[in-house]
């Protein structure tokens, strides 16, 4: 299994706006400086920056964006450029996350009073939270503010991160509303299509099969979340509140479902992962249940321990979590000049190699100590495999 471990989340450090009520802006010099540091950070930290493109192509891409910035630029427009540069790396972990005032500005914008799903590359409207009750759930959106749905999707996709050429990953991030500052249709539409707060939606109604048009007023995120809960009994943030892992067992029909919706541990919500799996597989074996369904929908990965432990119950022979892996061990010292603005204490970001991840070849050259990496070592199967 080929895998890449990236521990890099793009967090562009925009300069503070002088006034909260005005859009964040950057001078051309500030924008070019941020692009310089972004390129430097990717070259320094990302282990597979040139996996899909040559260095010449990547350099030309950055030069192209640099040439587009002729004068002062809004933070939102600059974020659009940066998101495109990061998505072009084709790394599913390389999110572009607005910071400080820019994040506040984006999250304060009024948004569409409904949720989006992409089905067969078409936009569909779900859970309408507007005052217009005539739109059926699941209706297909034909256009928004005069832009055809296909045109909207095609313009959004280039700024959505995904591993390689996995387009389905992009669709899922467009549909996700868990992290609105760097995921979800509202953000991508705002960056790539228009910044209006009123939406003229042409749609094909799911029930009547007739074309209709609705003029919908934008609402705040809190308003939409409240209507979703009261009208549809859906908690937008239920993903964070659902215990993981969870077990459903139907001994009569000889099957069991193991749902692992998240691969990071929240002690306030989740049961002990190791103990849950040990009890679960022991009982599975004791009851001679032959059919196991593992539901990993919406699981974004995270803890390699959780992944490896689950596999140890499924493999009867020793296994490796990775057959090949490129690991970037981050040391933020070269980035300290731009980190200090947001991180008052940078000491926690500096890596003194206490765990021997790195192997020193010379004063100026350290390489990853791959032999030390646990994910490449053989792992034994569990007793109740």
Image (tube, grey):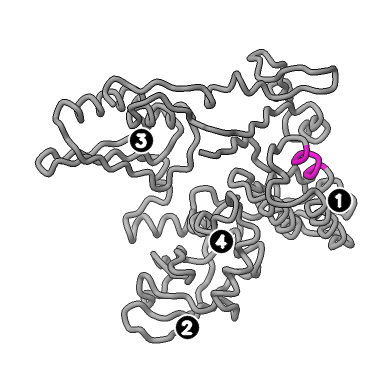
Identify the residue shown where x is 35% and y is 74%: 136
From the viewer's perspective, tell me whether residue 308 is left or right of residue 112. left
Could you tell me how far apart the alpha carbons at marks 1 and 2 are, in whole angstroms?
43 Å
Which marked residue is nearer to the observer: mark 3 or mark 4? 3
38 falls in the magenta region: yes
Q: Earlier in the sequence, mark 3 or mark 2?
A: 2
Q: Secondary structure at mark 4?
A: helix
Q: Nearer the viewer, residue 197 or 91?
A: 91
- Residue 229 in which image quadrant: bottom left
Which residue has dot 2 on it? 213
Q: Residues within 10 Å of mark 1 (few under 14, many from 20)?
A: some
Q: Which mark is residue 32?
A: 1
Q: Position of residue 237 (x, y in %)?
A: 43, 47
Q: Earlier in the sequence, mark 1 or mark 2?
A: 1
Q: Secondary structure at mark 3?
A: loop
Q: Position of residue 124 (x, y in %)?
A: 44, 70
Q: Position of residue 382 (x, y in %)?
A: 33, 22
From the viewer's perspective, tell me whether residue 72 is left or right of residue 242. right
Q: Earlier in the sequence, mark 1 or mark 3?
A: 1
Could you tell me how far apart the alpha carbons at marks 1 and 3 are, in whole angstroms?
44 Å
Q: Which mark is residue 186?
A: 4
From the viewer's perspective, tell me whether residue 105 is left or right of residue 287. right
Which marked residue is nearer to the observer: mark 1 or mark 2? 1
Could you tell me how far apart the alpha carbons at marks 2 and 4 are, in whole angstroms?
20 Å
Q: Are marks 1 and 2 in contact (CB under 8 Å)?
A: no
Q: Are marks 3 and 2 in contact (CB under 8 Å)?
A: no
Q: Residues within 10 Å of mark 4 (few under 14, many from 20)?
A: many
Q: Is residue 172 above or below residue 272?
A: below
Q: Position of residue 250 (x, y in %)?
A: 15, 41
Q: Residues within 10 Å of mark 2 (few under 14, many from 20)?
A: some
Could you tell me how far apart the alpha carbons at marks 3 and 2 are, in whole angstroms?
42 Å
Q: Which residues are magenta?
A: 37-43
């Amino acid at each position: 299994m080929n895998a890449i471990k990236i521990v890099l989340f793009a967090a562009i450090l925009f300069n503070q706006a002088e006034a909260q009520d005005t859009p964040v802006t950057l001078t051309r010099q500030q924008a070019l400086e941020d692009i310089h540091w972004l390129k430097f950070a990717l070259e320094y930290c990302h282990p597979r920056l040139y996996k899909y493109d040559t260095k010449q192509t990547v350099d030309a891409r950055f030069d192209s964006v640099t040439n587009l910035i002729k004068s002062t630029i809004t933070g939102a427009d600059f974020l659009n450029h940066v998101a495109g540069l990061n998505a072009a790396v084709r790394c599913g972990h390389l999110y572009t996350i607005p910071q400080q005032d820019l994040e506040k500005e984006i999250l304060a914008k009024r948004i569409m009073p409904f949720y989006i799903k992409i089905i067969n590359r078409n936009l569909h409207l779900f859970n309408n939270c507007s005052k217009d009750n005539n739109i059926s759930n699941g209706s297909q959106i034909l256009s928004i503010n005069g832009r055809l749905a296909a045109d909207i999707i095609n313009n959004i996709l280039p700024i959505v991160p995904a591993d390689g050429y996995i387009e389905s990953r992009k669709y899922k991030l467009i549909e996700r509303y868990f992290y609105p500052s760097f995921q979800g249709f509202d953000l991508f539409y705002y960056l790539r299509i228009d910044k209006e707060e009123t939406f003229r939606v042409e749609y094909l109604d799911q029930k009547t099969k007739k074309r209709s048009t609705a003029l919908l007023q934008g609402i705040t995120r809190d308003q939409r979340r409240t209507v979703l809960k009261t009208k549809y009994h859906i908690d937008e943030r239920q993903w964070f509140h659902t215990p993981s892992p969870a077990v459903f067992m139907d001994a009569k029909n000889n099957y069991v479902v193991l749902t692992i919706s998240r691969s990071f541990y929240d002690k306030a919500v989740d049961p002990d992962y190791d103990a849950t799996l040990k009890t679960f597989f022991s009982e599975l074996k004791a009851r001679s249940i032959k059919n196991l369904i593992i539901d990993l929908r919406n699981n974004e990965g995270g803890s390699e321990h959780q992944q490896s432990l689950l596999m140890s119950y499924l493999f009867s022979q020793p296994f490796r979590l990775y057959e090949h892996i490129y690991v970037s061990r981050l040391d933020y010292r070269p980035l300290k000049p731009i980190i200090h603005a947001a991180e008052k204490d940078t000491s926690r970001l500096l890596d003194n190699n206490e765990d021997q991840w790195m192997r020193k070849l010379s004063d100026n050259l350290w390489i990853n100590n791959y032999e030390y990496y646990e994910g490449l070592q053989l792992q034994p199967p569990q007793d109740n495999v």
